[in-house]
Image (cartoon, grey):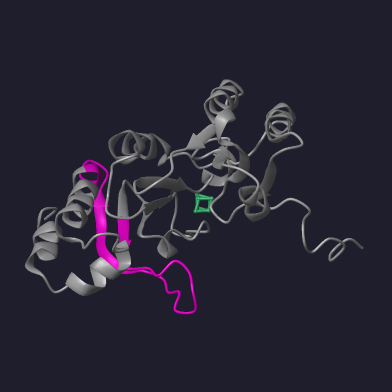
Amino acid sequence: MNAFQKNVPDQTFETLNRHGEFTRLAVSPGIINKHYTPAQFQKIAEIAGEKGAIKYSASYSILVSIPTCDATEAVQALQEAGLYVAPSGSIIAMKACDFCDGEKMEAAPITEQLYHAIEGMKVPARVRVNINGCASACYNAVYDDIGLVYQQESFDVYLGAVPMGAKAQAGTLFAKRVDVTQIEDFLLHLINLYKEHARPNEPYYKFYRRTKSAEYWELVKNSIK
Ligand code: SF4
């Protein structure tokens, strides 16, 4: 019942854009928290109103499309409701698991530290850094551009994932057991190499696969020894 009731929605992001300038906002309760309150859902519905559209995405956020002229005010109202509106564009974007709904928070402080260090940095093409709080990696860190899997005060770092498409593929282990005290510098190295050596708009995985025999990757690995 209802599984295929309405396969084509009345109002999609595409149809809206044909009738004016719309802005898409990626909204979530936070990088770690995945639970919305009823009041936050009401606020999202109120902001989309009759003119906008709402859909869920594969990146742990709800996408809200609204007239561009209302965007600044909408972002402010969403933030006041305690929601996080992810920045758009060619930047470093952070993702994380929910740390078992707050039951397994060991890696939460370092996740927050890394967020302040890297989120929003400008790069040649959008890079998703995904942090998972244990070896189960149930939020698929190894399928994002830079995957960090926490275990015992350290991170395993995965690079080279093809996140989507017919050739989608998990990343491979680039460095094992990078200590939490070193991970911020390590991550900045990985990002700065991309900024320095990538071609315009080159996705992170293409850049890594094209250059992985270059000496500078070894230098990054050796920086933690
Ligand atoms: S990756 Fe580990 S810590 Fe994170 S939600 Fe999954 S099981 Fe919990």
Q: Quadrant of residue 218?
A: bottom left
Q: Is residue 87 visible?
A: yes
Question: Does the stretch in magenta take in 102?
Answer: no
| x and y percentages locating residue 129 in the rendered image | 37, 51
Q: Is residue 159 visible?
A: no
**Number of callouts in the render?**
0
Say left or right for 98 vs 173: right
Q: Quadrant of residue 160?
A: bottom left
| x and y percentages locating residue 11 in the rendered image | 74, 50
Report the residue at 29% width, 41% height from top.
121
Report the span colored magenta. 156-184
| x and y percentages locating residue 159 in the rendered image | 31, 64
Location of residue 194 with respect to 66 vertically, above or below: below
Say left or right for 104 vs 193: right
Q: Quadrant of residue 162?
A: bottom left
Location of residue 120 with respect to 164 vertically, above or below: above
Question: Does the stretch in magenta take in 158?
Answer: yes
Name the quarter where the N terminus is drawn. bottom right
| x and y percentages locating residue 17 in the rendered image | 61, 49
Residue found farthest to the right: 1
**Depth check, front residue: 111 or 199:** 199
Residue found farthest to the bottom: 166
**Depth check, front residue: 117 or 125:** 125
Residue found farthest to the top: 80
**Depth check, front residue: 156 or 91:** 91
Name the quarter where the C terminus is drawn. bottom left
Say left or right for 161 vs 48: left
Location of residue 37 with respect to 195 vertically, above or below: above
